[in-house]
Image (cartoon, grey):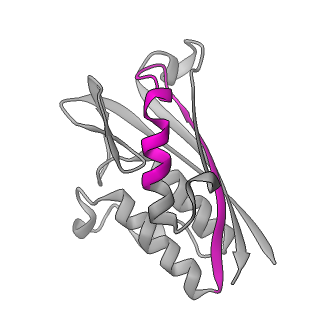
């Protein structure tokens, strides 16, 4: 049996914070504001994985109102979400994600991000797709005020 989940996350950009995407530090003049490390890519994938198993969302399992998650490593939260869905009898088959941002360019970092995410998801690198897209200068992402991430996860019964 297969299950599909969709995830989405957005964060404002801020000065003085490292940019973390998919568990990797990306050279950038801005980072992402968030209660945890602000890794919008991991957050969207976490929601997609949990959603596919009807296991709630990132806020239910790791609420931003809980001080223990202040500055949390979002890659670790993704690993924990994968463990939650495994307990429900599912394993990740593949993940596809799109990062919407004008800067920085995502393509130079994609292979490193894919490898890191694959390790956290317990799949091969060929089962993880990450793409960067601009917003053609439109809206918040176009003005550099934030980043948006869309993700889809496919789970299979184990």
Figure disc tally: 0
Q: Residue at x 62, y 49 (%)?
A: 151
Q: Residue furthest top?
A: 137
Q: In the image, is residue 95 part of the stretch drawn in magenta?
A: yes
Measured as percent of width and height from the top left, residue 82 is found at: 51, 73
**Residues in magenta?**
89-116
Q: Residue at x 18, y 30 (%)?
A: 16
State the residue in front, 92 or 39. 92
Q: Residue furthest right?
A: 1
Q: Residue furthest left?
A: 16
Q: In which quadrant of the rendered image does the C terminus lie? A: bottom right
Q: In the image, is residue 46 part of the stretch drawn in magenta?
A: no
Relative placement, left or right, of 28 versus 158 is left
Relative placement, left or right, of 27 versus 121 is left
Specify whether residue 58 is in view: no
Q: Residue at x 72, y 74 (%)?
A: 156
Measured as percent of width and height from the top left, residue 1 is found at: 81, 78
Specify whether residue 99 is in view: yes
Residue 28: quarter of image? top left
């Amino acid at each position: 049996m297969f299950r599909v989940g969709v995830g989405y996350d957005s964060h404002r950009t801020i000065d003085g914070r490292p940019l973390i995407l998919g568990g990797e530090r990306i050279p950038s003049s801005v980072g992402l504001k968030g209660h945890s490390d602000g890794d919008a890519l991991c957050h969207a994938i976490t929601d997609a994985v949990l959603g596919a198993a009807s296991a709630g969302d990132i806020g239910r399992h790791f609420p931003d109102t809980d001080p223990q998650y202040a500055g949390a490593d979002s890659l670790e939260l993704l690993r924990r979400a994968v463990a939650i869905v495994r307990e429900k009898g599912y394993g990740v088959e593949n993940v596809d994600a799109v990062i919407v941002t004008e800067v920085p360019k995502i393509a130079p970092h994609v292979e490193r991000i894919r490898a890191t995410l694959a390790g956290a998801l317990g799949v091969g690198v060929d089962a993880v797709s990450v793409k960067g897209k601009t917003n053609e200068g439109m809206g918040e992402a176009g003005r550099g005020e934030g980043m948006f991430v869309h993700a889809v996860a496919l789970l299979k019964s184990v």
